[in-house]
Amino acid sequence: MKGYIVLENGDVFTGEMAGQQREVYGEAVFFTGMTGYQEVVTDPSYRGQIVVFTYPLIGNYGMQDYTDQSNEWQPKAIIVGECSPVGHHHLSYSSLTDVADQNDVPILTGVDTRAIVKTIRSEGAMGAVITTNPDVVDWSNYSSIESVSYVPDVSTKSIEQYDGGSLHIGLYDFGHKNAMVKELSAFGAKVTVLPYDTPFDTVKSMQFDGVLFSNGPGDPKQLLEHLDTYKQVAIHHPTFAICLGHQLMALAFGADTKKLKFGHRGANQPVIDLQTGKVDMTAQNHGFVVDEQSIDQSSLVVTHENVNDQSIEGLKHHELPIMTVQYHPEASPGPKDSHPLFHRFFQMIQTEKEVTLYA
């Protein structure tokens, strides 16, 4: 059956509906990676979005066990040029289309994805509707994409614990990816996943050696009411913050954030470490960044920068053991370019333990 994506600016693009045939609304964004579609559709940072894949053939290696980044599909729909009906890989257990159907997520195929991406790059990310009848779309039925907060949907509802060694890491969950727990566990840490609204007294009572603030969907300013808590947690623990967590740390310590025109979403974003001069190829998924004009009024210093547009990709506190990055070091781009960041985090924890021991 014919399907359509109707953009908020009035543009309509035609394709074919695969699987579910229902109307959905979300923010239209694009992902530039050649692979990684399974990680994308299960990444909580894509909650509520309609993801346009720029690579022309998606689904060719099927779906594989142990690759999901959460227990459910997160986008409202996905848009592809061509979707392979079969997964041509010896580890594939099902096709992309079959699993999308099981998760009630429409796929629109045969679309001019290049034209959609050019529109988004020109006019910015915007609301969009997937439908089988573009003539009856009623925009009054949908809330503004800026007004919806998805963090409460994707954050854990209760404290979860993963066994490990002697170090104990608290993971503030704004929509964390499974790979984050795996990376922390690989260093021998016990990991406790915390709901996004966990109060400071609860965190303090658990005596963490360090805290990781995770990625998540949407505008960090939708969580302003919790900033004081996050700041207190970071002041009292060695802290590593990723993506949305990075933006929240910036807000908590006096900087500001702003929305990018069309965001960074892909596995090929070059980022320079200003401390070492080394450039990493990074995986990214965000629509907001820290405003570079606001750094001077904060207690933070820039450590990483995007080579393409010079946007801020990393921060550290002037005095406290707090480090942040905008990108995803756990996503294995490069494939291991950013892995040393976890080493830095655990070295920072060890240094703080030694300082406390000899204080």
Image: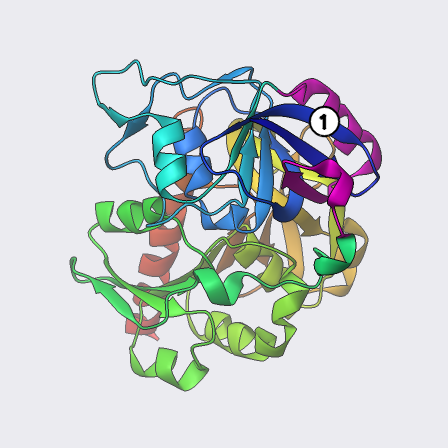
- Which residue bears the numbered disc 1? 13
Q: Is residue 304 visible?
A: yes
Reply yes or no: does residue 117 show up in magenta: yes
Q: Quadrant of the C terminus?
A: bottom left
Between residue 334 and residue 273, name the one nearer to us: 334
Residue 306 x %, y %: 66, 34
Q: Residue at x 55, y 73 (%)?
A: 231
Between residue 164 and residue 55, name the one nearer to us: 55
Reply yes or no: does residue 85 show up in magenta: no
Q: Residue at x 76, y 52 (%)?
A: 138
Q: How is the image coloured?
A: rainbow
Kind of element beneath mark 1: strand
Q: Which residues are magenta?
A: 111-138
Q: Amino acid at mark 1?
A: Phe
Q: Quadrant of residue 286?
A: top right
Q: In the image, is residue 108 above or below residue 243?
A: above
Q: Quadrant of residue 194?
A: bottom left
Between residue 199 and residue 278, name the one nearer to us: 199
Residue 198 x %, y %: 42, 77
Residue 291 x %, y %: 75, 52
